[in-house]
Image (cartoon, coloured by chain):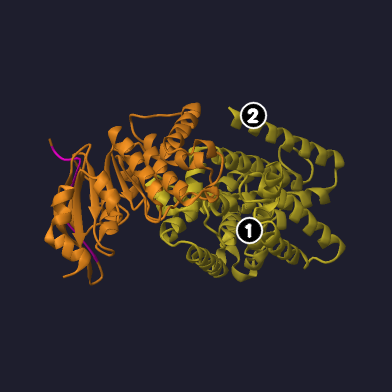
Amino acid sequence: MRGVTFTLILLGIALAIFALGRWFGSSYAFFMGYVVLQYIVLGTAWNILGGYTGYVNFGVTAFFAIGAYSTVVLHKLIPAMPLPVMIVIGGGLAGLVGLGTGYLTLRLRGVFFSIATLALAVVVQTLITNWDFVGGARGAYVLRPRVAPLIGGEYVQYLFLMMLIMCVIVLATARAIERSALGYGFAAIRDDEGAAEASGVPTLRLKLIATGLSGGFMGMAGAPLPYYVTYLDPASGFSLNYAVNAIAMPLIGGTSSWAGPVIGAVLVGGLQEYLRVTISSAVNVLVAGVLMVAFVIAAPQGIVGLFQRKRK
Amino acid sequence: MSALLTVAGLGKRFGGFVALDGIDLEVQAGERLGLIGPNGSGKSTLVNCICGTLQNEQGSVRFADETIDGLSAHQRTRRGLARSFQLPRPFAGLTLAENVRIPILYAVNARPSGHLHGAAIDERCLELLALVGLAAKARQRPRDLTQIEMRKLELARAMAADPKLLISDEAMAGLSHAEVDEIIALLIRLNEQGVTVIMIEHIMRAVMEFSQRIACLVAGKKIADGSPKDVVRDPEVVRAYLGE
């Protein structure tokens, strides 16, 4: 029941944010907000596997780009397909790839798993780069409709709204996991896989759930990207930024709670955007890198951890 | 009546090294068995094969009238086979109460018989911690515990799965005399509640005090099995421990 209340509160906040944006009426605010929201989804998705279950995924771009490129394919095949359907398909595909990777690699632990996910990103990028249908290395144009369906106004508002809804779904899921038997199972795997198994935890099945969910959510986050950028090529779809930010944001915010990736994404995403406008557009990866190093040394539990320690 | 646990002709190799060679072992329901043997004799490998952490290549393991070969460790735990680890392996990120919660959620609640929810789980967690005298530290994390408390947490977590058979793998190594007595008393109390216990131990005083029967492994073979007095006088056992 408390999960329902939480979801309703999230929906209320989301609605308020959107209403505020409409009232403000600046398309720049929507463009910027979209990026922050996208990182909330990506960071939370990464955290389900990386934070809760303890498997560090460096291959974020693989799942993200599968979502993005599935939209490119769908747009070419059925241009009239509504965006929410594309998001579901993109997320589903990435989730399936997550399951497959999980099945193949989860016998690897620690750093070996991480290396395997890195390899996955390279493999997927190579495949996409050599696939002419989606533009290969040249990239593909996806024309954005001028007006948003249903809600009217600029199309970016529609993209923003989609990402906002995804945020609600992903955060509600993450919080539900934290408070369920699944969350305890994930935590047991993170702390000691052998002891978890001896305590009756079906570790392989739980890890597959984690990789599937995590991958699926990353794919969902990537699915609207072609409409956002209108021109997608492998270099931007597989940009290192996504991987670095999706890892840095939960680490900075705190990996133990759903609130961590949100705080991290708002803080780092906001700061990056501010610096992009005021200093230069190249400085934003540096921000994530420097902050990540600082937090790993000074506050390994992230910002959420700092507050929890104070409360004690 | 058939035995609770029957190990028949169990064999395990690591490459060319024969760790276990044709082990036969029966444990009756309600029994207290001591398992001894010098370092490297295969005691822990035997436990790992019984619990499913390792899969045996030869022979078979029957538990509660069911052949459990090929089942994974969590499936065996759900069937009522629990173990504690030689070196304590607590879930470091979780509180003590949450540590014992895991087997309740995943072993007890996975059985058709038992479904605990909400407050009943919290209550059971405290009850388990109280059983080993750790109830006051329920909200602390394992890093705050002393060695003996860590061993007790290991046992509490194994007991949380509500097992028919508990295998205690060297729960007493490195503990003081009084602490050893405490753990023995705890294991006997569990046994009186109806749990069959296999105790693996190097501390002979503890083994003699606790066991109704002792089995001795040497170099992957079982060389003795009988009443504690007979086993410690067995010339082969004496030779294995003290040499010619």
- Residue A38 or A157: which is nearer the viewer? A38
Number of numbered markers: 2
- Which label is found at residue A15? none
- Residue B10 or B184: which is nearer the viewer? B184
- Give amino acid for label 2: Thr
Whether residue B219 is visible to the viewer of this picture, yes or no, is: no
- Vertical side of A310 occupied by A105: above or below: below
> Magenta residues, as a range?
B2-13
Q: Tell me which chain the residue with mark 1 is part of.
A: A
Disc 2/disc 1 C-alpha distance (Å): 29 Å
Taking the image as shown, residue B173 lies to the left or right of residue A207, namely left
**Which element type, helix, strand or loop, lies under badge 1?**
helix
- Give amino acid for label 1: Ile
Q: Note the chain letter of the yellow one.
A: A
**Which element type, helix, strand or loop, lies under badge 2?**
helix
- Which label is found at residue A5? 2
- Vertical side of A55 occupied by B228: above or below: above
Taking the image as shown, residue B206 lies to the left or right of residue B59, namely right
- The residue depicted at 29 percent of the width and 40 percent of the height is B79
- The residue depicted at 59 percent of the width and 48 percent of the height is A86
